[in-house]
Amino acid sequence: MRHTGDIGQFRIVSEGGVAAGIRRLEAITGSGAYRRAVQRDGLIEEAATLLRTTPDLLPRRAEQLAQENRELRRQLERARQSGSSDQVTRLLEGASAVDGMRVVAAEIDAEGADELRALGDQLRERLGSGAAVLAARRDDRVSLLVVVTDDLPGRGVRADRLMREIAAMTGGSGGGRPHMAQGGAADPARVHAALARTADLVRSLVQS
């Protein structure tokens, strides 16, 4: 190359730091730059077609879709919170009475560990005095959560101890803190029987 004008088209493809105050630019030139420009134009046209707009309006359409997505996420979160509140009410209605405590043991629907913990927190707040053991199936796995109210550890009913007992019945394992514990069931077929034993387990843990 004898003159910079021989470079022709020039396209920067990357930028990065190599030392303090020094940036490194990488670019392609000539026919390579032209092919890259044509490829990018094709991608823009394809994206505009998929989003049912024109290339000139593509940024505005993308922002509109992003706003719609954020609003849908907010609506979904509100729906989940409402559904979670209804589910907590149903669980409390099915609670067993054990030595002045309410004991909940149930298999529930939960999208993931965060939703399971959120449901457990809501139950713990509304139990008054009691414990809850929740099992959530997802594909071929079963997650377990145990929560107890603040007064129960002093009576010998700790979430971590209760979790170990429940998890062991399913061939799984788990642990945590006195008020909240998590684990998993190795044999999903044994979960129902383990939940049915929860009230008896709580009764056996109570210190006289």
Image: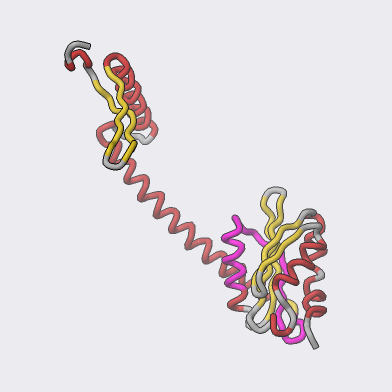
Q: Position of residue 205 (x, y in %)?
A: 79, 79
Q: Nearer the viewer, residue 153 or 131?
A: 153
Tell me if residue 125 comes above or below residue 8 in the rendering. below
Q: Position of residue 113 (x, y in %)?
A: 61, 58
Tell me if residue 188 comes above or below residue 152 in the rendering. above
Q: Position of residue 9 (x, y in %)?
A: 23, 19
Lateral position of residue 83 relative to residue 173, left or right: left
Q: Nearer the viewer, residue 72 or 22?
A: 22
Q: Residue furthest top?
A: 2
Tell me if residue 118 comes above or below residue 19 in the rendering. below
Quadrant into which the N terminus falls: top left
- The quarter of the displayed image where residue 126 is located: bottom right
Q: Nearer the viewer, residue 60 or 178?
A: 178
Q: Can the viewer see residue 21 in this picture?
A: yes
Q: Can the viewer see residue 94 in this picture?
A: no
Q: Position of residue 37 (x, y in %)?
A: 30, 22
Q: Residue furthest front?
A: 20
Is residue 122 one of those drawn in magenta? yes
* Residue lying at 34% horizontally and 36% vertically, measured from the top left: 18
* Residue lying at 78% horizontally and 85% vertically, measured from the top left: 207
Is residue 196 one of those drawn in magenta? no
* Residue lying at 67% horizontally and 74% vertically, measured from the top left: 178
Q: Nearer the viewer, residue 42 or 179?
A: 179
Colouring convention used in this rendered image of the protein:
secondary structure
- The quarter of the displayed image where residue 145 is located: bottom right
* Residue lying at 71% horizontally and 55% vertically, measured from the top left: 142
Lateral position of residue 42 relative to residue 131, left or right: left
Quadrant into which the C terminus falls: bottom right
- The quarter of the displayed image where residue 102 is located: bottom right
Lateral position of residue 95 relative to residue 86, left or right: right
* The magenta segment: 97-123
